[in-house]
Image (cartoon, rainbow, N blue to C red):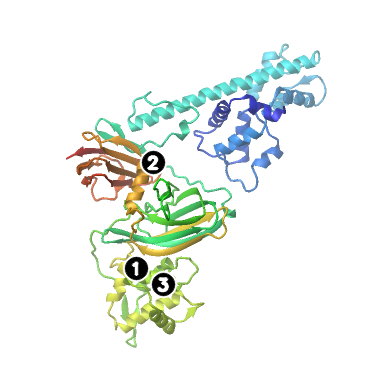
C-alpha cells in the first residue's frame, strides 16, 4: 500500500474530517471562512502535519484561484500525504550542510518549517534543549546517528500529535462558545441541544422566532456573502432586465419562460438596478422562484428559489435542472417596496413651447424617458424591439401593439434594423406632445404606469437585472412572456400558495397555543424572515399577531400588529420581515393569540 493512500484508509472518515476541521479552526473562526492566499493554504496544510512542495501548492492554487473553501481544503488533505518520520529522516541527512556532525538551531528550524507542522524558533529551541546534553545549543548525532534520527523524529511526531490535540481542544472551546452565543440569542436553555463537532458550523441559522414563554424571538446577523461557481466564466450566460410595479397595492412584474434543452447545473442571480427605491440606503429585496411547467409526482411545482445574497442586494441560487420548460418568477416581499401612501408637492412640467410655438418635452421629462427606455430595453442591446415595445405598451395602456399601430411607428420615426432607438423613442413622445397640443394627460398615464410620481421620482417601480448561467447547456432560452400579476397555476394554486408551501417545508414549526391544528412556521434566510400560518382544522380561525417588540425590522404591512382570519385547510403568509438598516443586526419577536 502506498504512503499516499495509507493515511486515509486507516483513519475513520469522520475522524479525518474532524482533524481537518480542528486544523482549519486553529486559523479561522469558522469553517465558512475561505482560504484567500497560497500562504494561508500552506499554513493550513501544515497545521494538519502536511508540508506540500511549491509544485504541489501550485497544483491547487492556480493563477485563476481566488479562494478555497473548507470542503476544498478537505479534498486536498485527502489527496496529499501527511509528513512521516521517514520524510524527516531524509531531511536530517540532507540538512547538515557543513558535515560537522551537528545540527544547529537554524538548521533544525529549516527542517521543521519544510517538513511537518510549522514551528517557531522558540519552539524549536525548546525541543533542542530537551535533548541537548552538553547545553551548547546544538544537536550532536555523531555517535549513533541512526538511533538519534529515530528518537528525535519520534519526538517531533509526538509533538505534532500534541499540537493536534491542542487544536482539538481549541475547536471544542470555539464550538461551545458558539452554541452558548446561539442559545443566549434565541433563548434556548444551555445544554438542551445536542452538539456535533462535525456539523456545528452547519447548524441552521437561529430562527427569528423560537419559543420562549409566549413569544417567538431570535436574532439574525447582518453578514452577507454570495458564493458563485468558481468556473462561472466558462458557463453560457443569458440575461434580461425587468421591473416590479406596484399597482393598487398589488405586485406586477416581468415574468419569464426558461427552456432548457439539456440537463444542466444552473446559477441564477437577480438584483435591483440603479433608480430603484431604497437603493440609496438598503436595497429592495429581489428574489427568484423557479417553477416546473407541471407538477412532479408529489404535486410540487417549485424547484428552487434564491435565499443567499451579497451586501449589494444580489440574490443567487444554484441547482441542477433536468431538460425541460420552467417558469422563472421574480419576487419581492414588499418590506421596502410598498404602495405610495399619498402624493404631495408641485407637479413637474412635462411640456413647454419653443419660440416658434411648437410643443416640446422638457429637459427633466426627457431624462426620465431616457431611463424608461433603458429599463424597457430588456435585452440591453441599446434598442427597443417590437416585443419590448409591446410589453411597454401593455404596461402603459393595457393593450398590445397591433400591426397597424406598429406601422405608424415605422412611418413616423427612423428604426435601426427594425428596432426603436433611444432617439426614436424620445421622438415618439415629442410627437405625442405635439399631437395633443400640450395636453399631458396621456404622458402622465405613461409615467404613472412606469412607477413615477408627480415629481418624476420613481417610487412605484423597481427595475432589476436577471442573469442565468448554464454549465452544460449552450442553447438555453430565457424569454420574457408577460408583465402582469402572478397567474394561477395547475391545481388552481396561486403563487402565494406555492411559496407558502416552500416556506413551510424549509421553516421552523411551532404549535399555536390553544389550538392543536393551527401551526406557525418561520422561514428565515440572509435577507428576510417569513411567518406562515397553517390552519389544518375545519374551522375559520382569527389570529392576532404582535411583532412590535422586534428590533430593527420593517415589514410588508403598515403595522407590526395585525389580526388575520385563516380559512379552514388554508395557509396565509402572515408577515415578511427584514432589517430596516442592513448595517445593524436585527431581531424578530412575535406573539400570537387566538381570538
Q: Which mark is residue 395?
A: 1
Residue 475 is labelled as: none
Measured as percent of width and height from the top left, residue 401 is found at: 38, 75
Instruction: Using the image, determine if residue 411 lies above or below residue 291.
Output: below
Q: Is residue 337 shown left or right of residue 89?
A: left
Report the residue that reaches farthest toward the front.
297
Of residue 439 and residue 595, the one placed in the foreground of this image is 595
Q: Quadrant of the N terminus?
A: top right
* Front residue of 524 and 161: 524
Within 10 Å of disc 3 (Cα), the crowding (few <14, some 14-19, many 20+) is: many
State the residue in front, 242 or 178: 242
Residue 367, visible in the rendered structure: no
Distance of label 2 from label 1 (alpha carbons) = 35 Å
| Percent coordinates x, y for residue 474 in the rendering | 57, 58
* 18 lies left or right of 250: right
In the picture of the structure, the residue carrying the numbered disc 3 is: 389
Query: Mark 2 or mark 3: which is in front?
Result: 2
CA distance for labels 2 and 3? 40 Å
Circle 2: element type: helix
- Residue marked by disc 2: 506
Determine which quarter of the picture holds residue 548. top left
The percent position of residue 251, horizontal first and vertical second, equals: 32, 58
Residue shown at the point (31%, 80%) measured from the top left: 352
Q: Is residue 518 above or below residue 316?
A: above
Extreme residue in the left direction: 595
Amino acid at each position: 500500500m502506498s504512503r499516499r493512500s495509507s493515511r486515509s484508509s486507516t483513519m475513520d472518515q469522520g475522524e479525518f474530517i474532524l482533524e481537518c476541521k480542528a486544523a482549519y479552526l486553529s486559523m479561522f473562526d469558522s469553517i465558512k471562512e475561505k482560504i484567500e492566499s497560497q500562504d494561508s493554504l500552506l499554513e493550513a496544510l501544515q497545521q494538519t502535519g502536511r508540508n506540500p512542495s511549491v509544485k504541489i501548492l501550485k497544483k491547487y492554487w492556480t493563477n485563476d484561484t481566488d479562494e478555497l473553501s473548507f470542503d476544498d481544503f478537505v479534498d486536498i488533505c485527502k489527496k496529499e500525504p501527511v509528513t512521516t518520520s521517514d520524510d524527516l529522516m531524509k531531511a536530517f541527512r540532507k540538512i547538515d550542510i557543513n558535515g560537522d556532525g551537528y545540527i544547529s538551531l537554524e538548521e533544525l528550524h529549516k527542517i521543521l518549517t519544510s517538513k511537518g507542522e510549522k514551528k517557531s524558533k522558540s519552539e524549536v529551541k525548546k525541543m533542542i534543549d530537551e535533548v541537548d546534553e552538553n547545553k551548547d545549543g546544538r544537536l550532536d548525532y555523531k555517535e549513533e546517528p541512526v538511533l538519534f534520527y529515530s528518537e528525535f523524529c519520534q519526538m517531533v511526531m509526538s509533538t505534532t500529535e500534541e499540537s493536534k490535540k491542542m487544536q482539538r481542544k481549541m475547536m471544542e472551546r470555539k464550538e461551545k462558545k458558539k452554541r452558548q452565543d446561539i442559545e443566549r440569542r434565541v433563548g434556548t436553555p444551555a445544554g438542551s441541544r445536542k452538539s456535533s463537532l462535525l456539523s456545528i458550523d452547519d447548524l441552521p441559522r437561529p430562527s427569528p422566532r423560537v419559543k420562549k414563554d409566549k413569544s417567538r424571538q431570535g436574532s439574525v446577523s447582518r453578514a452577507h456573502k454570495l458564493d458563485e461557481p468558481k468556473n462561472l466564466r466558462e458557463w453560457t450566460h443569458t440575461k434580461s432586465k425587468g421591473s416590479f410595479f406596484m399597482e393598487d397595492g398589488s405586485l406586477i412584474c416581468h415574468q419569464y419562460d426558461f427552456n432548457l434543452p439539456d440537463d444542466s447545473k444552473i446559477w441564477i442571480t437577480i438584483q435591483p438596478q440603479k433608480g430603484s427605491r431604497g437603493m440609496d440606503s438598503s436595497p429592495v429585496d429581489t428574489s427568484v422562484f423557479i417553477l416546473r411547467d407541471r407538477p412532479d409526482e408529489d404535486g410540487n411545482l417549485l424547484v428552487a428559489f434564491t435565499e443567499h445574497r451579497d451586501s449589494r442586494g444580489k440574490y443567487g441560487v444554484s441547482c441542477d435542472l433536468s431538460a425541460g420548460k420552467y417558469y422563472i418568477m421574480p419576487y419581492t416581499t414588499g418590506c421596502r417596496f410598498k404602495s405610495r401612501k399619498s402624493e404631495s408637492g408641485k407637479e413637474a412640467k412635462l411640456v413647454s413651447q419653443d419660440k416658434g410655438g411648437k410643443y416640446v418635452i422638457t429637459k427633466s421629462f426627457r431624462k426620465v424617458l431616457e431611463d424608461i427606455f433603458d429599463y424597457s430595453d430588456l435585452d440591453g442591446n441599446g434598442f427597443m424591439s417590437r416585443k419590448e415595445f409591446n410589453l411597454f405598451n401593455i404596461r402603459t395602456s393595457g393593450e398590445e401593439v397591433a400591426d397597424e399601430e406598429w406601422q405608424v411607428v415605422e412611418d413616423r420615426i427612423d428604426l435601426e434594423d427594425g428596432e426603436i432607438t433611444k432617439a426614436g423613442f424620445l421622438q415618439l413622445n415629442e410627437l405625442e406632445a405635439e399631437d395633443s397640443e400640450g395636453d399631458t394627460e396621456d404622458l402622465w398615464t405613461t409615467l404613472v404606469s412606469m412607477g413615477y410620481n408627480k415629481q418624476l421620482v420613481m417610487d412605484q417601480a423597481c427595475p432589476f437585472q436577471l442573469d442565468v448561467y448554464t454549465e452544460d447547456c449552450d442553447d438555453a432560452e430565457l424569454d420574457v412572456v408577460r408583465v402582469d400579476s402572478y397567474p394561477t397555476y395547475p391545481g388552481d394554486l396561486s403563487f402565494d400558495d406555492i411559496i407558502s408551501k416552500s416556506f413551510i417545508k424549509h421553516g421552523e414549526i411551532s404549535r399555536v397555543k390553544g389550538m392543536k391544528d393551527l401551526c406557525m412556521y418561520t422561514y428565515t434566510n440572509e435577507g428576510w424572515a417569513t411567518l406562515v400560518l397553517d390552519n389544518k382544522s375545519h374551522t375559520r380561525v382569527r389570529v392576532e399577531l404582535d411583532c412590535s417588540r422586534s428590533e430593527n425590522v420593517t415589514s410588508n404591512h403598515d403595522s407590526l400588529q395585525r389580526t388575520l382570519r385563516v380559512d379552514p385547510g388554508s395557509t396565509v403568509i402572515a408577515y415578511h420581515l427584514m432589517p430596516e438598516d442592513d448595517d445593524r443586526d436585527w431581531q424578530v419577536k412575535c406573539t400570537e393569540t387566538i381570538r
